[in-house]
Structures are given as C-alpha cells and as structure tokens.
Amino acid sequence: MSNGSNLNKLIKTKIALADQECESETRKVISGFYSEIKIENGRLRLPDFQKAANAMGCIIYNKEKRFNSELGRILNVSGGFSSQQELELSQIHMREYFEESRYLNRYEKFLESVDLKVKGYGLKFERERYRTDLPSALYKVLVKNSIRRAISSVNSELEIFLNSKVSSNNSASLDAIDVIELKPNFMGIGLNLNAIYRKFMRKKT
C-alpha cells in the first residue's frame, strides 16, 4: 500500500490531468457555438444560448464522473486510505476543483466573446433582444446545484476507501458507547437494545 504522502500526491497528479481533459473537451464544445455566429443571407445568425449554458454547466457533472472513476481506480490498487486524516486531506483537495468561483462567470465571459465577434461584423449584439438573461440565471442555478452534488458524490467515493481496519476501530468505539447508556431505571444503567441489534447485524454481514 502507498503511504499517505505518496497516495495523495498520486491522486493530485491524476485528478489534475482529468480536470485538464474535461476543460479541453468543454472548450471544443464551446468553440462549436462560436462557429455558429455568422452572417447568412444578410442576417446575423447566433447560437442557441440555452444550449450553450447547459454545455458549460455539464463540465461539473463530467468532472464528477471522471474524478470518481479515477479515484476508484487509484484507491482500489493502493488499498485505500490508511487514516482519517489522509482521507480528509484528499477531500479538501478535491473540493478545490469545485469552487464556485471557477465556474460562475463563464457564461458571462461567453456572452462577452459573442459580443466581440458580432462587433467584428460591424453589428451590435443586443442581449435584451435575445433574452440572454434567462439562460444566464439558469446557468448559475445549474452550477450551484451541480457543485453541491459533485462534492457529495466525490466525498462518498473517497470514504468508501477508508482502510477497513481504521473504520472498524472507529465503529467499535462507537458501539461501546452506544450499547451502554445511562437511563433513569432502578440500576441507573441500561442497555441500548437498538445498538446491540445493529452490532449483531453488522457482524452477520
């Protein structure tokens, strides 16, 4: 098994590459929308702004899937995290890829680029006419919801690979606390039957 330092270094390297791949793929898709801006039969043709917003927002979902796949592969081979601290360090690092500031302004920058290209034709890009405010608002909602889901999903993926010895030690300590509890009965100490049942069922599985 890799030691904690080497495992997290490997995760950082592989996830950085996966992030770059997702960014590159998304740039190609967005370039396709730019190519739709043209003068055709004397009329200005513009891309579907809602589709462009959706395409930009999808990068978060794509990263979620790619990251989880890469993490599963790495951690299966390495044997997982050897400590809770090692797991938490990795979770902190992964959250950096889902900072809202990385994504929230992308659609606005896209519109600014559309404006520049339209000006190149000697025309004016009238946002009000094309109601770009609607996809812009929906894009921000999409980003925020996707980020929340992605962080939860990636954290869950990482937690699966906390070394079984570490997790079993933690749950054993919790079991001991749960089984014996103070209750207002004649001895002052009672047994938590639900906790005993949970412990019994865990051993059976």
Image (cartoon, rainbow, N blue to C red):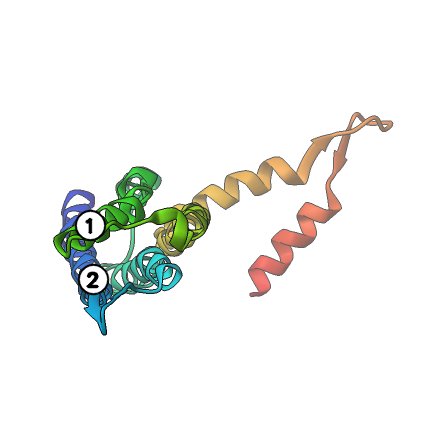
Q: Point out the tag, 1 or 2, that comes first from the N-terminus.
A: 2
Which residue bears the numbered disc 1? 113
Q: How many marks?
A: 2
Q: CA distance from mark 1 to mark 2?
A: 8 Å
Quadrant of the image containing the N terminus = bottom left
| Residue 198, position as x, y percentages in the image | 65, 53
Question: Which label belongs to residue 34?
Answer: 2
Residue 15 as seen in the image, left or right of residue 184: left
Q: Which percent across, then down, holds residue 110?
A: 25, 51
Q: Where does the image place residue 200, in percent across and percent down from the top left? A: 63, 56
Q: Name the foreground residue: 129 vs 59.
A: 129
Given the image, on which type of amino acid does mark 1 rest? Answer: Ser
- In the displayed structure, does residue 117 sit left or right of residue 84? left
The three-letter amino acid code for the residue at tag 2 is Tyr
At x 58%, y 58%, the residue is: 202
Please tell me in which quadrant of the rendered image residue 61 appears.
bottom left
Quadrant of image for the C terminus: bottom right
Q: Is residue 94 visible?
A: no
Q: Are marks 1 and 2 in contact (CB under 8 Å)?
A: yes
Residue 204 in view, yes or no: yes
Relative to 79, say whether 94 is above or below. Answer: above
Q: Residue at x 69, y 53 (%)?
A: 197
Q: Tell me the residue at 30%/38% (across/down).
A: 101
Numbered tag placed on residue 171 in the rendering? none
- Nearest the camera: 156 or 63? 63
SS for callout 1: helix
Residue drawn where x is 32% and y is 49% of the image? 126
